[in-house]
Amino acid sequence: MVQDVFEGTINGIRERAGNAALEEIAVALNIRQDYYQVETSIVVNETINTSEMVSRFSGIPVPKNKAVVGGNTFSHESGIHQDGVLKNPLTYENITPELVGVKIPLVKLSGRHAFVEKLRELALGFTEEDIKPLFAKFKALADKK
């Protein structure tokens, strides 16, 4: 049986309980196309933007522990975790942050590798000699936060 219509929620917001979360269904259909064999026109990398817009307009904050769109979904404060995710995103997660439009932030426990990757992502010109003092300044600032 083929369904052309799906009724769901964004951020779990709907007039009653029991409706499936669109963001979770969209990601599942995207990462498991081999299993579900379904194609959609959902723009998955706009998931976070859509979630934030719904939250802003509704006045209902997204719970930090909400699957896919919650603030803790891609939280890796441990430098070793961030390093593992940078080397192979599937080490700690079954979806990549980029899939849903998230960028991994630098935090006080971020390691040197994550710091250098962020410098590259921002297209900041730097040399190997610049890294040590820049990283030290970042750590000092992050510890104050």
Image: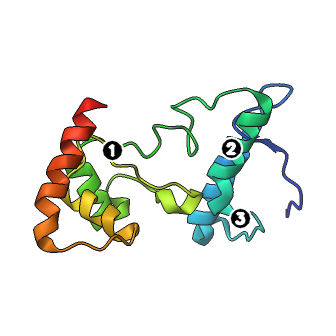
| Residue where numbered disc 3 is placed | 43
Q: Is residue 138 left or right of residue 1?
A: left
At label 2, the amino acid type is: Ser
Element type at mark 3: loop
In this rendering, is residue 78 above or below 127?
A: above
Q: Position of residue 114 (x, y in %)?
A: 27, 58
Q: Residues within 10 Å of mark 1 (few under 14, many from 20)?
A: many
At label 1, the amino acid type is: His
Q: Position of residue 82 (x, y in %)?
A: 28, 53
Element type at mark 1: loop
Q: Position of residue 38 (x, y in %)?
A: 72, 69
Q: Residue at x 25, y 64 (%)?
A: 116
Please identify the quadrant where the C terminus is shown: top left
Note whether residue 120 is visible: yes
Please identify the quadrant where the N terminus is shown: bottom right
Q: Is residue 88 left or right of residue 53?
A: left
- Quick check: marks 2 and 3 in contact, CB under 8 Å? no
Element type at mark 2: helix
- Quarter-wise, where is residue 115 in the image? bottom left
| Residue where numbered disc 1 is placed | 76
Q: Is residue 17 left or right of residue 81?
A: right
For the residues labelled 3 and 1, the Cα–Cα distance comes to: 25 Å
Q: Residue at x 67, y 49 (%)?
A: 23
Q: Residues within 10 Å of mark 2 (few under 14, many from 20)?
A: some
Label ID, residue 122:
none
For the residues labelled 1 and 2, the Cα–Cα distance comes to: 21 Å
Return the disc, 3 or 1, that comes first in the chain's sequence: 3
| Residue where numbered disc 2 is placed | 51
